[in-house]
Amino acid sequence: MPLTDVAVRGAKKRDKAYKLSDAGGLYLLVEANGSKLWRHAFRFAGKQKLLSLGKYPLVSLAAARDANKRLLAAGIDPSEKRKADERAALAAPLTTFNALADAWLANQRETDKSATTLDKLTWIIDLVRPQIGQLQIGAITSANVLEALRKVEATGRHGKNRYETTKRCRATLSRVFSYAVAEGLREFDPAAAFVKSGHLIPPQTRSYAAIVEPKAFGALLRSIDGYDGTKETRLALQLLALTALRPGELRQLRWSWVTDDIANPAITLPPNVMKMRREHKVPLSQQAIAIIAELRGSTGWSSMHAEVGADYVFPNAQPRRLIGRDGMPSKRPALRPMSEGALGSALRRLGYSSDTHVPHGFRSSFSTLANSSRLFDADVIEAALAHSDGNQIRSIYNRATYDADRARLAQWWADYLDDLRKSGNVVPIAKARRSRSA
């Protein structure tokens, strides 16, 4: 069934990239980060070929459909036509920014960069063409670049995403102008002035609201224990407090990542779900193992669907939705992980507003109270939080994961939370420290 503008506009990101097919070999590739990229698969002279057509919404559905239609009807190979155009761009006199940008993009296509990367570079360059595209290369000033960046900033999405787009645009412009300098077309890069000039101001960020006072944190833990919503949400909050995982990491947790045997109980998160794109192993305390055991009796059924990537510890679906009419597992299960807002909604239902404590705040609670105990080296606590070392050289050479220390930290933290839960009898950290060492 052919695509519609509504379907293309409404396509949402998923855990993995997927395709929406149109007619004639055209399809929309929706990446895991939400980017929408046009691709055209066609045969020419008996050979199967694939061509990228750009990024939606810069390239509309109508434009994508029309992109290669006339060339194919005239017996022209669109991929060879593109190569010829790029060779011409490289050979043509580079007088305007548009000509320079086209030559630079053609040069990038000669490298081993992926089609996705090339699409993004093209999209970024297209953002500034209306402002500086027709200007002579040698006449472009830093003021011209700033005006173009301000336009990008003004038309982009709000907050951090808008700032990141503008920052990436500036970095790409620097690469284009550096190419011009190397070609002898300019003396300097006019975009370099904004690296540290302060003109591109990042949005003000707020720390995640978190309770870090022991008595108040104990009250929060007791409130969670008494949560009257779904059992899975209560267990998720309890496990979040024990492990100090990021909420997104916990939400996407899969049974295949959990090892809850006595010898080496841990959660091993793969690089693709981690902020720093590195595998992260989380030792489990006895209390966390008990929660995992309870969850196996509640959502363990989802582990039967690991072959379709649906073995979520916290699924947002019922098992009956995974079974087809023939009684066999569905080939396309409707299973999804717990929704992004579920844990926050549960905290608000317990009376904790977003200004008091949020799901991500459990990490701050853990960091503050664990550091206050002075029982563990700060590096061990940072490793438990999967934080990268700010010193890049030290980070390269210091690959210690402190497994034994982190296992002791996990059990101490779980025991300390049990102490905090004791109604009206909060154990000070110093006293807890003495009792552990006794």
Image (spheres, grey):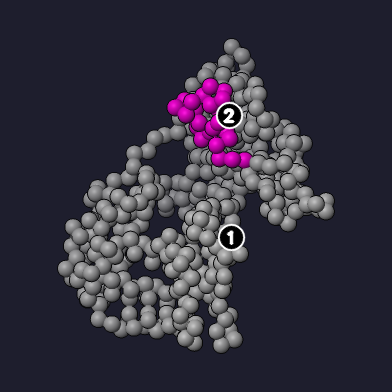
Q: Is residue 340 left or right of residue 171?
A: right
- Look at the magenta stretch and give its main secondary structure: loop
Dot 2 alpha-carbon crowd within 10 angstroms: few under 14, some 14 to 19, many 20 or more? many
Q: Residue placed at 72% from the left, 41% from the top?
A: 318
Dot 1 alpha-carbon crowd within 10 angstroms: few under 14, some 14 to 19, many 20 or more? some
The quadrant of the rendering that contains the C terminus is top right
Q: Please name whichever residue, 38 or 147, is drawn nearer the observer in this view of the structure.
A: 38
Q: Please name whichever residue, 408 or 321, is drawn nearer the observer in this view of the structure.
A: 321
Residue type of the residue flagged with mark 1: Tyr
Q: Is residue 136 magenta?
A: no
Q: Seen from this angle, which residue lies furthest right?
A: 327
Residue 242 location (% of width, % of height): 61, 32
Q: Residue placed at 50% from the left, 31% from the top?
A: 358
Q: Is residue 346 left or right of residue 80?
A: right
Residue at the spot of label 1: 18
Residue type of the residue flagged with mark 2: Ala
Residue 94 location (% of width, % of height): 25, 77
Q: Is residue 249 above or below residue 219?
A: below
Q: Residue placed at 54% from the left, 32% from the top?
A: 344
The kind of secondary structure element at disc 2 is helix
Residue 377 location (% of width, % of height): 51, 35
Q: Are marks 2 and 1 in contact (CB under 8 Å)?
A: no
Residue at the spot of label 2: 346
Q: Residue placed at 37% from the left, 81% from the top?
A: 85
Q: Is residue 340 magenta?
A: yes
For marks 2 and 1, the one nearer the N-term is 1
The kind of secondary structure element at disc 1 is strand
Segment colored magenta? 338-361
